[in-house]
Image (cartoon, rainbow, N blue to C red):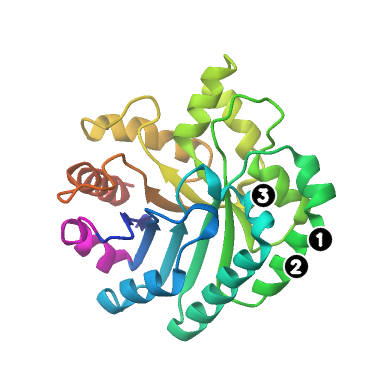
Amino acid sequence: MLDIMPKINDQMIGLYAIKKYITKYRKLEIELTKGDYGKFDLEDIITRFMDVLPNLKEITIRPRGNTNAFENFFYHKDSLIKHIETIKELSRENKITINIVFPIESNIRLYKDILYSDIKEILNLIKGYQVHILLENRIFIREDVCTPLEICKFFGDEQLLTCFNIKNTYKRSLLFLEDFKSYAKKYIHNNEKYIYQIHFSPIDKDIHENLEELQKDFMFLKEFHLNEKLICIDVKEIHEQDKIEEVKELEFLEKIGLQK
């Protein structure tokens, strides 16, 4: 069976449409709808979801917008530490794994030279807890933006891992006129142990019209040995009540998961 994580926003819009999948897999990604520069209440958000879905065993938190890039949080370090302490405590109290995803948008020198001690401090805070910091690749036109894998390999910490975004990788390969699979190897090849979660979506279109189209994109995961990672459904209609496209993606993935 595939390890699937449905996705919803922090207002619980469309919960009824995907609740059976959340209950089945006991995992959920929560996309925050507000809170620039870390101004959000994780305790309230996670507690509300645990009250409604008490059987959850893993939650991924996705802060919103461009202001919540990983490096930006270190301009508000006290706020970041407060969020980390909240996540640690909620993970311990509820006996669940909690991940928080940050996009990155700078070159490797910033993380190695300027933010090194700050990042080590954060990693020491979560050591021994069921907590992961996940770094995600953005599109970005600048060539000097490093990959999340470069950062994770440099720090070599099992709680600092990556969320591999398939569509962002595809779009970036187009920007630099490179073959998608060849370009993706820069993020993946021989680095599978650093990849914790996949943001899975149609690679070159908005939706999968049928099972065959999803199978084609899923073969990319299999080719790079990523099909056994945590797969989070990433669709555009995150704010819609009926969540038709997400339900369809979930149904298609379940069918593929039954295939040998």
Amino acid residing under circle 3: Glu
Q: Is residue 91 above or below residue 31?
A: below
Question: Which residue is painted at 35% across and 30% down in the image?
Answer: 216
**Label 2 crowd bin: few (<14), some (14–19), many (20+), radius 10 Å:** few
Q: Residue at x 55, y 18 (%)?
A: 175
Q: Main secondary structure of the magenta part?
A: helix
Mark with earlier residue (1, 3): 3
Depth check: 169 or 241 in front?
Answer: 241
| Label 3 or label 2, whichever comes before in sequence order | 3
The one nearer the camera, 249 or 218, is: 249
**Which residue is the site of mark 2?**
121
> Which element type, helix, strand or loop, lies under badge 1?
helix
Please state the horizontal and vertical placement of residue 247, each as a whole percent of the image: 21, 48
Is the C-beta separation of discs 3 and 2 under 8 Å?
no
Find the distance from the CA under tag 1 to the CA under tag 2: 6 Å
Q: Is residue 21 magenta?
A: yes
State the residue at coordinates (40%, 54%).
34
Query: What type is the residue that disc 1 sits on?
Result: Ser
In the picture of the structure, the residue carrying the numbered disc 3 is 71
> Which portion, as a residue range, is magenta?
13-25
- Circle 3 packing at 10 Å, graded few (<14), some (14-19), many (20+), is some
Q: Quadrant of the N terminus?
A: bottom left
The residue furthest right is: 113
**In the rendered image, which quarter is residue 117 located in?**
bottom right
The answer to whether the residue labelled 1 contacts the one labelled 2, judged by CB atoms less than 8 Å apart, is: yes
